[in-house]
Image (cartoon, grey):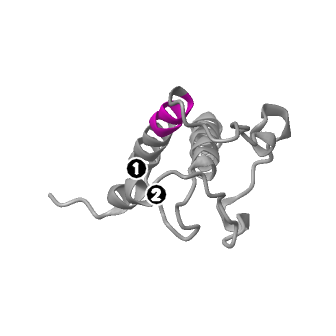
Amino acid sequence: TANKKERSWPGRRRTQSINNAFADLRDCIPNVPADTKLSKIKTLRLATSYIGYLMGVLESDDCGDGFKADLSSHRRGERQTRPQSQVDPGKAKGRTGWPQHVWALELKPETV
């Protein structure tokens, strides 16, 4: 059984790495309540939708007084991996102007 445990370690490490990446991505999606559980596919859909929204904002003539992204908590060398249980449930995600209905529609249960 020792060999079996040694062989499964890279798989567990890869799975944990993927889960950490999805947790980081979820933290980048604004206006989603902190207690909302997002599946990986919903996380990807919301992230691509948000990226599309941001691209539209940047391409439009109406950028307000300018746009300055706060990426300080998402810089590669500064990230800390935390277990999901340690994420602050009261963490406020900043208001970006991204319409609430965009993510609200995505969070509705899927009907089969």
- The circle on residue 38 is 2
Residues packed near mark 2 inside 10 Å, few (<14), some (14 to 19) or many (20 plus) = some
The quarter of the displayed image where residue 8 is located = top right
Where residue 99 appears, x then y in whole percent? 45, 55
**Which stretch is magenta?**
52-58
Camera-side residue: 23 or 11? 23
Camera-side residue: 70 or 62? 62
How many labels were placed on the picture? 2
Whether residue 59 is situated above or below residue 73 in the rendered picture:
above
Whether residue 53 is situated above or below residue 98 in the rendered picture:
above
Prevalent SS, magenta region: helix
| Residue at left offset 28%, top offset 64% | 109
Where residue 72 appears, x then y in whole percent? 81, 42
Going by the picture, which residue comes out furthest to the right? 78
Going by the picture, which residue comes out furthest to the left? 112
Q: CA distance from mark 2 to mark 1?
A: 6 Å
Where residue 63 appears, x then y in whole percent? 60, 37
Q: Secondary structure at mark 1?
A: helix
Task: Work out which quarter of the rendered image holds the C terminus and state it.
Answer: bottom left
Camera-side residue: 28 or 69? 69
> Label 1 sits on what residue type?
Lys
Which residue was labeled with disc 1? 42
Residues packed near mark 1 inside 10 Å, few (<14), some (14 to 19) or many (20 plus) = some
